[in-house]
Amino acid sequence: YGKKTISEIERDYELEIPKIIRNIKQKKAKKVLLQFPEGLKPYSQVICDEISNKANCQCFIWLGDCFGACDVPVQVEKLGVDLIVQFGHSKWNYKDKKEIEVL
């Protein structure tokens, strides 16, 4: 994979970057974890830079395995993450886990 711009990546993937930025600002999240499926991991740094610059937040990239909306990396609580953004997965509602919101 060569380095692509965010515009080039969005031609192939519906990332919903404006929606993510809007949610981060509304929730006043300062530390955001970005979780990617394997196909988007080569573009994770470009996506991370776009979000952190436009939302004025610190983003972390989760490079561990991600098998869907049910695969939330709970160990990130030690990082003090305010919000988790999962790319490429359907929304999953958690009944007992409300400490960190997941988009």
Image (spheres, rainbow, N blue to C red):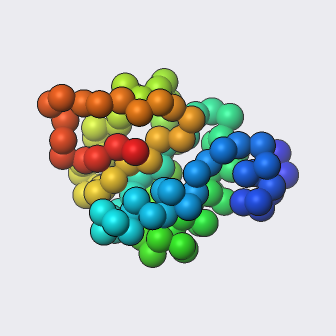
Instruction: Decide which of 21, 62 is in the foreground and name it.
Output: 21
Q: Quadrant of the N terminus?
A: top right
Where does residue 57 sit, x and y in percent of width and height? Answer: 42, 70
Q: With 53 as the anchor, is 95 left or right in this view?
A: left
The part of the image, by quadrant, that contains residue 12 is top right
Instruction: Decide which of 11, 66 is in the foreground and name it.
Output: 11
Whether residue 58 is visible to the viewer of this picture, yes or no, is no
On screen, 66 above or below 5? above
Extreme right residue here? 2
Residue at horizontal 48 percent and vertical 63 percent from the top = 21
Whether residue 102 is visible to the viewer of this picture, yes or no, is yes
The part of the image, by quadrant, that contains residue 25 is bottom left
Where does residue 98 sit, x and y in percent of width and height? Answer: 18, 41
Where does residue 39 sit, x and y in percent of width and height? Answer: 68, 34
Q: With 92 as the anchor, is 43 left or right in this view?
A: right
Q: With 23 as the anchor, is 52 left or right in this view?
A: right
